[in-house]
Amino acid sequence: MAVRWLDPAEEEAWRAYRRMRTLLDLQLSRDLAEYGVSEADYDVLSTLSEQADRSMRVSELAQWMHWTQTRLSHHLTRMQSRGLVTRETTSEDGRGARITLTDDGWQLLRAAAPGHVTSVREHFIDLMSQTQLKSLTTIARRVVDHLSD
Amino acid sequence: MAVRWLDPAEEEAWRAYRRMRTLLDLQLSRDLAEYGVSEADYDVLSTLSEQADRSMRVSELAQWMHWTQTRLSHHLTRMQSRGLVTRETTSEDGRGARITLTDDGWQLLRAAAPGHVTSVREHFIDLMSQTQLKSLTTIARRVVDHLSD
DNA sequence: CAAGATTGAAAACTCAATCTTA
DNA sequence: TAAGATTGAGTTTTCAATCTTG
């Protein structure tokens, strides 16, 4: 079967996307590092913070973040030792573990969030027009829908 | 100073972008893994392959890929031990090292490329209209220009 | 046995030296 | 001394068990 290689416009789109991804990631993690937070940390903290009780099951968190349970488990061990989350065996299911954001974890997120949002604006959101923002959302949603079995 | 939080549309754009990024990455690396190649491997191999002599200086490659020299050096050690690249001291500059794609490295890229391009199409490029492709390119270029000191 | 989660070893990446040549 | 590159130690991520409860 013949491969359909990318034409010049497609190639350029792919390269530009990849480059944006790389540079934006570097910038955002550099900025977050000032608060002693990695992107992974921030994602865990902010996800937990959005729950009414600031807690989630490990499996639930892993699925939501698209992380393997193994990776999350190791990461939570480190965050726990830093006092950012607690781990408790839950009554719902004797096998399960429930992760809860501590006050320190919440405070750390509160401290990092304004700077992070400012970075996201400065290096991404504010560089686009309203139309472009809409367009990006549509594209991203399409890709996400496609990839979410 | 007051923080300008993201409004709902901006928030949605940012979340969708992040989710796309995560899922697309997972899918592409899963697909590449079938050929025994990581995304990092693929990037090194394809970058070298685009040079006339299939070779580059380490520093040049590191700058182009936005990798630290350390990361690249370690990665090249592994690729070298797999027989994918060679390392030679160059005559131009006694301090420098020149990395060259071996025939095996070239063959591995040739083997992986069709499948990779097919993945990129299926999960990204072909999901967009011409207009969306252009729009994405414009956005990405803008972000890249902004972030490229 | 399957599901939820953890563990330990190996691989990959980062950070702080170190080494060599300009 | 600075530039180009590597090294080794520590951290993070992955891979393959393992453990415990449903």
Image: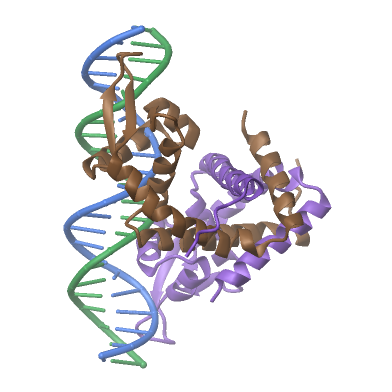
Chain colours: A purple, B brown, C blue, D green
Q: Residue at x 35, y 66 (%)?
A: A70
In the displayed image of the protein, which residue is found farthest to the front? A2
Q: In this orientation, which residue lies closer to the viewer: B85 or B142?
A: B85
- Choose top left, top right, bottom left or bottom right for residue A123: top right
Q: Quadrant of residue B142?
A: top right
Q: In this rendering, is residue B114 above or below A90? A: above
Instruction: Confirm whether residue B146 shows in the render.
Output: yes
Is B99 positioned to the left or the right of A2 in the image? left
Left or right of B72 on screen, residue A3: right
Q: Nearer the viewer, residue B88 or B111?
A: B111
Closest to the observer, B77 or A109:
B77
Which quadrant of the rendered structure holds the C terminus of chain A?
bottom right
Residue B94 as seen in the image, left or right of residue C9: right
Q: In the orientation shown, which residue stands out farthest toward the right?
A: A130
Image location of residue B16, percent across then percent down:
65, 62
| Picture layout, residue B126 above or below residue A149 | above
Residue depicted at x 54% and y 52%: A108
Spot occupied by residue A107 in the image (x, y as percentages of width and height) = 56, 54
Is the residue C10 above or below the residue B57 in the image? Answer: below
Measuring 68% from the left and 44% from the top, which residue is drawn there?
Answer: A118
Left or right: residue B93 compared with residue A5: left
Residue B105 or A17: which is nearer the viewer?
B105
**For the image shown, how many numbered marks are present on the structure?**
0
Which percent across, then down, holds residue B137?
69, 47
Q: Position of residue B54 (x, y in %)?
A: 39, 33
Is residue B12 in sight in this rendering?
A: no
